[in-house]
Image (cartoon, rainbow, N blue to C red):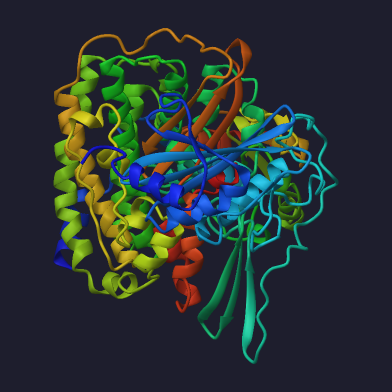
Amino acid sequence: MSHFDWLSELLARYQDEHILVRRGAATALAPAHLLEIDPEDWGRAAQVAAGYACRWAGVWAEQRDAELMVTAALARDGDHLLLRTQVPLSTPLLPSHTQYYPGADRMERHVQNMHGLVFSDHPDPRRWSRHNRWAADSYPLRKEFAVGSAPLPAAPEQDYPFIQTQGAGAYEIPVGPVHAGIIEPGHFRFQAVGETVLNLEQRLGYVHKGIEKIAEGRDAQGLARLAGRVSGDSTVHYAWSACMAMERAAHLAVPPRAQALRAVLAERERIHNHLGDIGAICNDVAFTFAWQQFARLRELWLRDNAACFGHRMLMDCIVPGGLATDPSAAQIAQLRAAIDPLRRELAALYPILDDHPSLEDRLATTGVLSAEQAQRLGCLGYVGKASGQDHDLRRDHPYAPYDRLHVSSPLFTTGDVAARMQVRMQEILDSLELLVVLLDTLPDGAVQVPWQAPAAGSEGIGLVEGWRGEILSYVRFGSDGRIARYFPRDPSWFNWPALELLIHGNIVPDFPVCNKSVNGSYSGHDL
Amino acid sequence: MLRILNKIRQTGLITEDLPREPVLEQVGAQLRAGIARQFQGSLAIRQVDAGSCNACELEIHALNNGYYDIERFGVHFVASPRHADVLLVTGPVSVHMETALLRTWEATPAPKLVIAAGDCAACGGEFGCSYASRGAVSNVIPVDAVIPGCPPTPLALMQGILQALQTS
């Protein structure tokens, strides 16, 4: 099967529907394909794609003089298709994709709040990213909006019209934004009867830091630093995806050693997060033995990061053009030597998790996300893989160095907390396998080439399989090598709404473990 | 059950075995003495993410792993600001978290300490001040001590908490 062998059929369907399609410059946003369409066809183009089993992968806009340029990403079999259109700023209207793709709901509202682009038939008119601290008729990503604009006076976010429940015995539990644990802020509104959750509604956006706006005008190195802080637990993957987008825009080839080491960093990041979260899931059902054991393994793993790359979380290791550090042969040997001990530890721990009756009692059949729900939302990463959604870019559309590796990806269909944990247990073993090959076949040579800023208007897309799932980054350069537009799309955009669905009918005390099994990024979503 | 007990036995007490970081014991002992003097042996911390990228949270979590085991010094994390002696605040204060942070600070009984943890909390870090960010925590509530780092390591966090007690 070759890439995009499905595209001609989709184009034929567009033709049947009289959707006028102009092929963009084929290589401008490679490996994605760009199609330019008319604004009035925007909704139908999504409808046809939804009927052709395409996944919806994001939407973003950018002001270009008196127009808004809007781009939406669709994906199938790991290939990304970009739909693009222009709407005048004087009448910024587009049909919504949400009725065909429920996963588009919040991101379209984000675009509406940030750019003032109105999705005319969007089913939910409520604001999303805006919390009453900037005016309803001012839009931070418009050019006339100054990055340093003073916010409106502080007021609690209390007039958001949550869905209401009425009836005998029904009650409401508001939680957050400041939560009980050491976690990120967000608001959860539960409606419950007795212990059973009738409905959960999320209100996010509390850690909105204006990332898209403050990215404007940065140089490439500055963008890489910022990207590494979109979601700190995914710093490697965000930096990689942003650098990949910038390097594609600049037609800059990264040395093979840097490519391989980027994957080493990425797999190490996947492992430390999975280790930490497996322990945390167990801790949420009071199995503290596993929590302490996995926290111990994670700590050792982070210390090796610090010893070999100079940073426990591997921040700022990936820079435009390659890598900031080149580990010595001794350091590579240290990384290699850590693999077998971890495997032995896991070989002792996994059977304990697998047959511990009280763990099974709490995790199996808890928080079930059906395959149909996961498919409709476009769930990614372990949330998707636990519910039959077999997406993994490293295998489906491999980027260097995965194009020379064999990547296997676990798949489960039960969609419960146990399945999401099983995916992560297996992914650790798979990542260790990849690390062995990567470290044993590490190419020699430089780890960095000098950065060369591309011409104004150059754009690029970065796509990597983060530990939460696919991360998409779009970058367009302005003049002097400065960033004109940066949009990073976290997989949590699609996995957060899944939490609202999978909690239905579960008991309130199981919410923490359900939440941990999804572990959406607040920061990566709120931007 | 036997496998669990065996694993625990084999793992042993990792907390006592810290050849790589002898300084940890010293920091811990000072920390314990400070807490005993000022807080009757028990220091309750309420952590508040006021806009962080979540890297600081991961390192604060690590304080509870067996290697650092910050609870042995009398430091524990509590679920409510009303139980807290210290607010450990991370992130540049996002404009959307400003009210929540203020209310959390007001809900914390005096005398209280505020520690700004991480570069963003200390000075705004990579995010600075903008329409969406108030920058340093001290722009919103009074701060008694800062712990630099992006993110600060668990050891730096322990040292920072100690320093805050010494200077308060």
- Is the residue A58 above or below the residue A487 in the image? below
Picture coordinates of residue A254, whole percent (x, y): 34, 16
Reply above or below: B4 against A131.
below
At horizontal 15% and vertical 54% (from top left) the residue drawn is A348
Q: Is residue A180 above or below residue A82?
A: below
Report the front residue among A456 and A304.
A456
- Image quadrant where one finds the N terminus of chain B: bottom left
Identified at 65% across, 52% down, the residue is: A109
Q: Is residue A435 visible?
A: yes
Placement of the C terminus of chain B among the 4 image quadrants: top right
Look at the picture and state if B38 lies above or below A127.
Answer: above
In this rendering, would B74 be left or right of A95?
left
Is A520 or B136 nearer to us in this picture? A520
Q: Is residue A305 left or right of residue B89?
A: left
Q: Position of residue B135 (x, y in %)?
A: 71, 33
Residue at the far bottom in the pictured view: A168
Q: Relative to A205, is B102 on the left or the right?
A: right
Q: Point out residue B3 in the picture as x, y percentages from the top left corner.
A: 15, 62
Residue at the spot 21% in from the left edge and 25% down from the top edge: A334
Res B125 → quadrant: top right
